[in-house]
Image (tube, grey):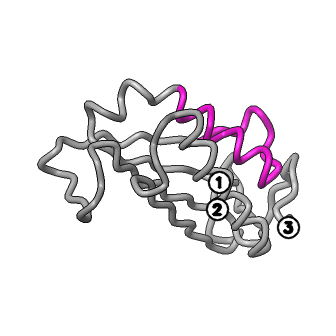
């Protein structure tokens, strides 16, 4: 299980939303082994005045927050981050400087979906990759 929150300035994020979602999901499938039908992306469009950003960033500045069940190795998480940086820059045009990524993990028992706890459900993919 992995869920993405994508934050950006409304006027910049809206036109690239579909393409960005496709790139993010391709990285998730390649690094985490997520199936094609397991896409959970939430786009949070902010007005310019509501999205404070560090110096040296452009209007394309974007933040990705990834919540997932614990179990992936450090190498797997690094692979995901590298893929996201490179593919988003190549395919969407957001530079490495304008992209920030943070992974948040929690134990399976803290997750609930399909009416069950995350540590009770049988997933169609592996978490321990």
Quarter of the image for residue 46 reads: top left
Q: Nearer the viewer, residue 116 or 79?
A: 79
Left or right, 53 with reference to 32: left
Magenta region, main secondary structure: helix
Question: Percent position (x, y) of residue 34?
Answer: 78, 46
Residue 99: x percent and y percent? 44, 54
The reply to whether dot 2 and dot 1 touch (C-beta < 8 Å) is yes
> In the rendered view, would you say 79 is above or below 37?
below
Identify the magenta region.
19-40
Q: What is the quadrant of the C terminus in the image?
A: bottom right
What residue is shown at x 44% (from left), y 47% (from top)? Answer: 6
Name the disc covering residue 128, or none: 3
Which residue is at a point 12% across and 48% down the rendered structure image? 49
Residue drawn at point x = 71 percent, y = 38 percent:
26
- Report which residue position mark 1 lands on: 2
Q: CA distance from mark 1 to mark 3?
A: 13 Å
Residue underneath mark 2: 68
Q: Position of residue 128 (x, y in %)?
A: 85, 67
Q: Closer to the N terminus: mark 1 or mark 3? A: 1
Residue placed most toward the observer, 7 or 125: 7
């Amino acid at each position: 299980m992995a869920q993405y929150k994508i934050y950006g300035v409304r006027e910049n994020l809206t036109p690239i939303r579909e393409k960005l979602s496709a790139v993010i999901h391709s990285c998730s499938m390649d690094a985490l082994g997520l199936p094609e039908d397991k896409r959970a992306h939430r786009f949070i469009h902010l007005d310019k005045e509501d999205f404070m950003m560090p110096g040296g960033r452009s209007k394309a500045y974007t933040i990705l927050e990834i919540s997932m069940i614990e179990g992936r190795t450090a190498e797997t998480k690094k692979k995901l981050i590298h893929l996201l940086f490179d593919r988003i820059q190549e395919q969407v045009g957001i530079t490495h400087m304008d992209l920030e990524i943070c992974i948040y993990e929690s134990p399976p028992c803290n997750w609930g979906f399909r009416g069950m706890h995350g540590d009770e459900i049988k997933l169609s993919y592996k978490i321990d990759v």
